[in-house]
Image (cartoon, rainbow, N blue to C red):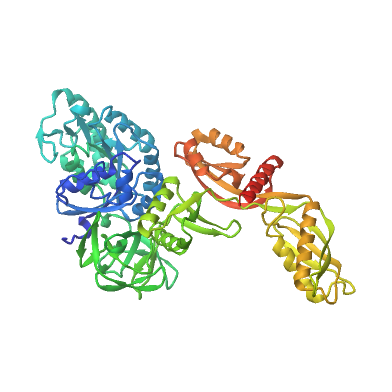
Amino acid sequence: MKEYGIKQLRNVGLISHGGAGKTTLTEALLFNSGATERLGRVDDGSSVIDYDPDEIKRKITINASLAPCQWQGNKINIIDTPGYADFVGDVKGSLRVVDGAIVVVCAVSGVEVQTEKVWHYADKYNLPRLVFVNKLDRENANFAKALGQVQEQLSAKAVALHIPLGSEDDFRGLIDLVNMQALIYTTGKGKDFSIAEIPAEYKDEAEEYREKLIEAIAETDDELVMKYLEGESFTTEEIKAGLRAGTLDHSIVPVLCGSALANIGIQPLLDTIVACLPSPGDVDTVTGRDVGTEDEVEVELSKDGPLAALVFKTMADPFVGKLTYFRVYSGVFNSDSQVYNVSKERMERVGQLFVPRGKEQVAVKHISAGDIGAVARLQETGTGDTLGHRDKPILLNPIEFPQPSYSVALFAKSKGDEDKLSTGLGRLMEEDPTLQTAQNTETRELILSGMGDVHLGVTLERLKRKFGVEVETKEPKIPFRETIRKAVKVEGRHKKQTGGHGQYGHVFIEMEPLAEGEGFVFEESIFGGSVPRQYIPAVEKGIREAMEEGILAGYPVVDFKVNLYDGSYHTVDSSEMAFKIAAIQAFRKAMEEAQPVLLEPIMNLEVLVPEAYMGDVIGDLNSKRGRILGMEPRGGEQLVKAQAPLTELAKYAIDLRSLTQGRGSFKMSFDHYEEVPARTAEEIIAQAQKEKEGE
């Protein structure tokens, strides 16, 4: 593949709600630029980009895919991102390394929930962007309505660069508002179009849209403002220069239109990507941290500087193994070399570098500053790591991935698969930083957490396909605990005669509640040797063993103190085991008399929602036994701070998505334990007894 200078590169992310047509648009961009010879389709599984078996099966994009193409002497690195909320990790990773974005909007559905979300992600990374109104050949397509929604919900600075010629079945081309001409597509493949005068019935509409475009361009430059106010016409060069300047400084969001499936409007989009979106050289320098001095430094985009590259995606490729995708910010990344992983402070041996296009990999000798590529079989490197030069290590700012919000408990179907399950999950977490696993020691469950039910469903399908491990899933058990509310004194006596030496242990204990969080305290106040010193540790051991399983529902007992204050022994029959058993009996008797209660974990919640959904969200939290602690405005949204029992929040990710039409998000963390209300406790205890009987 030809090498390009920094000014000839465009790194572009395609973002939108699922189903708007990003992948089909990517296929059309590749086809029209000559990168592929046929127009791949998602529906029939022939897409170059969506080649993963899960993507073909579900007909949705799951993985961000790199798709480079060449246009007018420039290289465009397109990253097609998932549109489904469960796979937002790949969207955030991709937006971290691109310099501009194309927001795809369906002409039928308009601006949808995930489109609003990814727009805000692009805002966070300060990305210049274009909007492409797609599917204008569909029934009920409405360009004016879609444009209005873009202006109202996304950006008031959005202005049309093109408007459609015809609609639905009659959609046949575009009207170019810069050159004021019609582009009429004449063949089914869409590569061929003719330039004609604007039809008379469209002239008034075209003039109206052009006036808005000229007004927006005039505001990008003082000289153009004066020229506009004096009624002078702009030259085509002035319009193009104003468009580029306005796009780069976010004062203009150009809106284009077409149909990716019908292959209409794709060449003008390629022209606009090159003309209006920034090259890496147009973007401000990125910041990092000098590992030696701990100072923040600016990384200058130059081939001559020390290597600084950021890994934004890792995936297991069926042909070359582990594939690491990276963006080079400084220096040159060479094939068959060694590179320093700044994040993990390890050297990595580098084999052949690639420029991937879907599952195809084009081997290259090096990847220079500003460009994006991939390398296979790095041993230590994971997503978010910085690769650099050992003598001048710069740690680039990491990618911020969202925290998992939905969990299931996993059980291997075959008993011998536990090791394979652990290995497989480890490999999948290398690919996807939004996956997490944890072993809950209290409930003895392996917990897998991710962004939603679809995300975890895809993960488990990959686990089966790639590692041959089948699992069963259950809703995670809640780690309840038990405690006491009353101080009691009890006796525990174990006596057994078996023919030879018998067994004898006898203890008196006092058991009293402690404040929340104080755990377990063991004391002894034996006087006169009624329990010999060598048996006292056995008493404590017996209590500790018994407290792992309370009498209400079998959950661990916490926040209590035991004082061993008396007892008796037999010079021949007493033993550590006998005193341990006596202590267990005393503990159970004490639990029965000390007013045992069930405790449940209470979680802190921070729920970010648009104001329109506040009432529904607060009402739902109240129904979940939640307490609202406060609310804070966050730029058009509200942050609701609350506490609620984990018992009620098992499926909160799904509930919140339903309540807010996908617009809400939340963070959850453990705060403390609280007593379970009596009626709820009865249900939990009954369920625990039922499960025990079932065993």
Q: Is residue 159 visible?
A: yes
Does 175 sit above or below residue 552? Answer: above
> Which of the 4 image quadrants contains residue 97?
bottom left
**Observer able to see residue 207:** no
Q: Position of residue 416 (x, y in %)?
A: 46, 63
**Camera-nearest residue between 121 and 451:** 451
Q: Is residue 538 left or right of residue 117?
A: right
As drawn, the residue found furthest toward the right would be: 528
- Report whether 666 appears left or right of 627: left
Q: How many circles with numbers are drawn on the protein?
A: 0
Pinpoint residue 264: horizontal percent, then vertical percent: 18, 37
Is 199 placed left or right of 138 in the picture? left
Please identify the quadrant where the N terminus is shown. bottom left
Residue placed most toward the observer, 511 or 129: 511
Quarter of the view holding residue 196? top left
Residue at 75% over, 68% down: 580
Residue 165 is situated, as x and y percent measured from the top left of the image, at: 18, 29
The residue furthest front is: 499
Relative vertical location of residue 82 with respect to residue 4 in this rendering, above or below: above
Drawn side of residue 515 relative to residue 671, left or right: right
